[in-house]
Image (cartoon, rainbow, N blue to C red):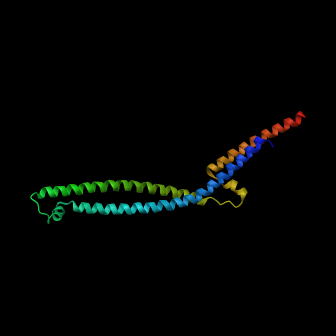
Amino acid sequence: MGEAMKYTLSLMLLLLVVSVGVSAQDSTSAADRVKQLKAQLLEVQGKEDALRSRLQQLDEAIKPENIERSLAGVGSTRPEDLREARRKQLSIERDGVLAQLQTIETSRLRLESALANAEASAYQESARPKPADGTQMLVVAGGISQRVMYAGGGLALLVLSGAGTLLYRRTRLR
């Protein structure tokens, strides 16, 4: 065997081993990714619930009768200014909570989408048959790895036919 042929065969073997290894790692990482996304989603939902609760409190506190009640014990020569300042303070806080709530809702929607994709990916990986021996690994490689396997097989055929041609020419010249 020529040096180039040995190099080509070893490179193809390396590609095959790496592709099978990556495929095996993806199945565990997809399931782990689903768990991670579910935990993140629960955390985001908890924050969203807390923000919605705070928004309800602020909506109630900003009502004119509740602002007056909150300032009932405070004496002032200008109660209108106090009420207006309190209303502005509550409005600013309410606007901040609304902005946070919008951000959290966007984050929740993205997490739900990512979770659906991860669950689909984990399902597809779990549906693939597990390899029983080394020869079956070639068949189970799947996806991009399978394309690499076909390309490697085609390359191997080209190398073997080239080597056969060279061998034939050498034997014929002698």
Residue 13, percent across and down? Answer: 71, 49
- Splitting the image into 4 quarters, where does residue 88 fall? bottom left
Specify the quadrant that holds the N terminus.
top right
Horizontal arrangement in the rendering, residue 28 relative to residue 75 (left or right): right
Residue located at (78% from left, 40% from top)? 161
> Looking at the picture, how far across and down is residue 89, in whole percent?
22, 56
Pick the front one: 128 or 21: 21
Please indicate whether residue 161 sits to the left or right of residue 31 in the image: right
Q: Quick one: which residue is furthest to the bottom in this view?
A: 73
| Count of numbered marks | 0
> Looking at the figure, which quarter contains the C terminus?
top right
Relative to residue 118, is residue 55 drawn left or right? left
Residue plotted at (48% across, 58% down):
115
Of 24 and 130, the residue lying toward us: 24
Q: Quadrant of residue 172?
A: top right
Give coordinates of residue 76: x percent, y percent.
Answer: 11, 60
Q: Among all residues in the image, which is located at the extreme left?
A: 77
Residue at the extreme top of the image, as rendered: 173
Task: State the residue at coordinates (18%, 61%).
Answer: 67
